[in-house]
Amino acid sequence: MRLSTLLLAAVVLPLAACQKPAPQEPAKPAEPTVTTTAPAAAPIAASSTVHDPSSYAEPEKVVVTHVALDLGVDFTKKVLAGSATLDLNWKDPAARTLVLDTRALDIQKVEGFDGSAWQPLTYTLATADKILGSKLDIALTAQVPKVKITYASSPEASGLQWLTPAMTLGKKTPFMFSQSEAIHARSWVPLQDTPGVRFTYEAHITTPKDVMAVMSADNDPKGARDGDYSFKMPQAIPSYLMAIAAGDLVYRPTGPRSGVWAEPAMADKAAKEFEDTEKMIATAESLYGPYRWGVYDVLVLPPSFPYGGMENPRMTFATPTVIVGDKSLVSLIAHELAHSWSGNLVTNSSWKDIWLNEGFTSYVENRITEQLYGKDLADMENVISQGGLAKDMGDLATGDQLLALAPLEGRDPDEALTQVAYIKGQWFLTFLEQRYGRATFDAFLRSWFDGHAFTSQDSVEFERFLNAELIAKNPGKTTEAEIHAWLHEPGIPAFAVAATSKPFDGVDESRGHWLAGHMKPADIDTSKWNTQMWVRFLEGMPETLTEAQLAELDAAYHFTGTANAEIAQRWYPLTVRSNYLAARPAIAEFLGRIGRRKLIMPTYAALAATPDGKVFAEQVFAKAKPGYHPITTGSVEQTLAAGKPKI
Ligand code: BES
Ligand code: ZN
């Protein structure tokens, strides 16, 4: 995956600053009532006192502790409309302003609760910043315990996608879903949109009668489907984990505390593919302690979902492209489940430290994969991802090759999401595991999760904890210079041990024989090859092949038109670079059907590299665009405009 340079063109509607009159009567002093309904949640505790540059919020003055949403899902207007009521915990006695993050929201009214009644409040909505959206300043005469904002989202909200019935499997019911990470929650809820603040939430959601709504909360598979739904999320979460989806969704259990939600035509297939979910939960629990979120469901989204998966608590949102029939891509579920510890329980306090979420999660994911599917598969996945990291690293500025990044001042946090955070982060933890031994390292990692549960943390705290709890207690295993190299120096340390895979050696050998003309495809025994081996086969090909070679591969393996998008992701760019025009109709179909960025961007980038390819890509994009998510649209537009391939 190469999310790094996928700069997102921010989808922002310029909003004029607007002033509303102040209430006539000053609000009465606030009652010291702070709702904390979270049984398992400790109070808000960001370790970092550094301000999150990706948010206008001022959590040092006041923090939102609970959000109550009352929203209608309007498929005709493509908006969520209603209100958000925020419970406030004031920290600074002198503070009289509540600053919230918004993006392209239509703010209609702001009120404060003075202990007995709601009073209108004065507010200022600033002109939109391209990256951050519009700062909402709410002026107060007293520190009220609650503020209510009446608003509607924009049809172009960066964190929502609206699908017409034609864009769904069933073709009868519209569909909508959110994607809040990194800073898109503000495009559908006005809030303190920083991972340094945690809050509980509840929601009342109305939809057309035949539409089912779900959230990252307590979904009830047996609840009435009547267009009127209520949710509670009693564990404190950061804003980027707020999530909602609505469509023709049905539920299938996959275990005592897990299940899938999907369109009816996909539900049984999804339940079969993800039938190991309960085993995954049990494996993670055996390593890192109890699963603290009650149920773990997976929502299978339409193929336009811009990511592979999103770890929304209690309900992972997932691409249907991992459902290939042989469970070969279910590491994605292991990954999103792993976030239940790394990310959702212990959260990066700002986006510069995203490796604490994604690097830790990639490590845990691989441990689950190894335990359930064996070391061969775990090794294959590591070889592929380390290869991807090496390729990416070369294009990154040295400052972006560090795990502990500088604050993302003036930068889109989605830009900080590179393979460095994922794979260098994972590799660092694997290095520690190798030096300290599994038993010691597993206990250490568990104590990191337990000791920081329901808090937001940064790299400084991790380094302190690492020194105190692992290095000082087990002297002589690592040096200060080695730890420094991993966290604060560019590149991959020279002493890092690269992953290897025996099955891949066999694949490499076969490819070599075929390229040398010593073997025909029929001579290669591919009967036991999984997706990863096919990926290896293709990734090891030269930059270009001849038309005859590509045709020979196609005749034997039917790559063109493959239903496996991981294979398509590697095959189509090779055909483009080799000017193999026979694949073009299938490329158009692939790019039109799938919106997951990782899968389609390499093909767009390869096409953008030649004038003729670019014209073709532009035609394909023009047709596909109405079905793409705003995040994918932004990436494709950037790649096509860049003149040189950028993925
Ligand atoms: N949390 C990420 C997705 C994300 C990160 C979205 C940052 C927006 C900003 C999720 O857990 C993830 O990493 N998804 C991967 C799949 C994984 C198996 C590597 C993806 O979507 O490809
Ligand atoms: Zn992740």
Image (cartoon, rainbow, N blue to C red):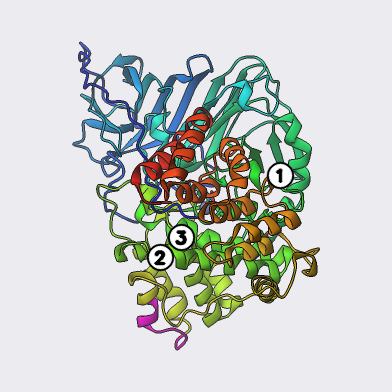
Residue displayed at 69% across by 35% down: 261
Judged left or right of residue 188, residue 168 is right
Residue bearing mark 3: 419
Label 2: element kind:
helix
Label 1: element kind:
strand
- In the rendered structure, which disc, 3 or 2, sits on the residue that comes first in sequence? 2
Q: Residues within 10 Å of mark 2 (few under 14, many from 20)?
A: many
Residue displayed at 52% across by 80% down: 497
- In the rendered structure, which disc, 2 or 1, sits on the residue that comes first in sequence? 1
Contact? badges 3 and 1 (CB < 8 Å): no
Judged left or right of residue 594, residue 260 is right
Residue 46 is at least partly visible in this image: no
Contact? badges 3 and 2 (CB < 8 Å): yes
Foreground pick, 193 / 494:
494
Q: Is residue 559 magenta?
A: no
Label 3: element kind:
helix
Residue displayed at 70% across by 54% down: 554
Q: Amino acid at mark 3?
A: Gln
Range of the magenta residues?
475-483
Q: Position of residue 372 (x, y in %)?
A: 73, 63
Residue bearing mark 1: 258
Foreground pick, 380 / 367:
380
Q: Disc 2 to disc 1, how far (Cα)?
A: 37 Å
611 relative to 124, above or below? below
Q: Position of residue 131 (x, y in %)?
A: 30, 39
Q: Nearer the viewer, mark 2 or mark 1?
A: 2
Q: Position of residue 488 (x, y in %)?
A: 33, 70
Q: Amino acid at mark 2?
A: Met
Q: Nearer the viewer, mark 3 or mark 1?
A: 3
Foreground pick, 420 / 508:
508
* Mark 3 close to ligand 1, CB under 8 Å: no
Picture disc at residue 393: 2
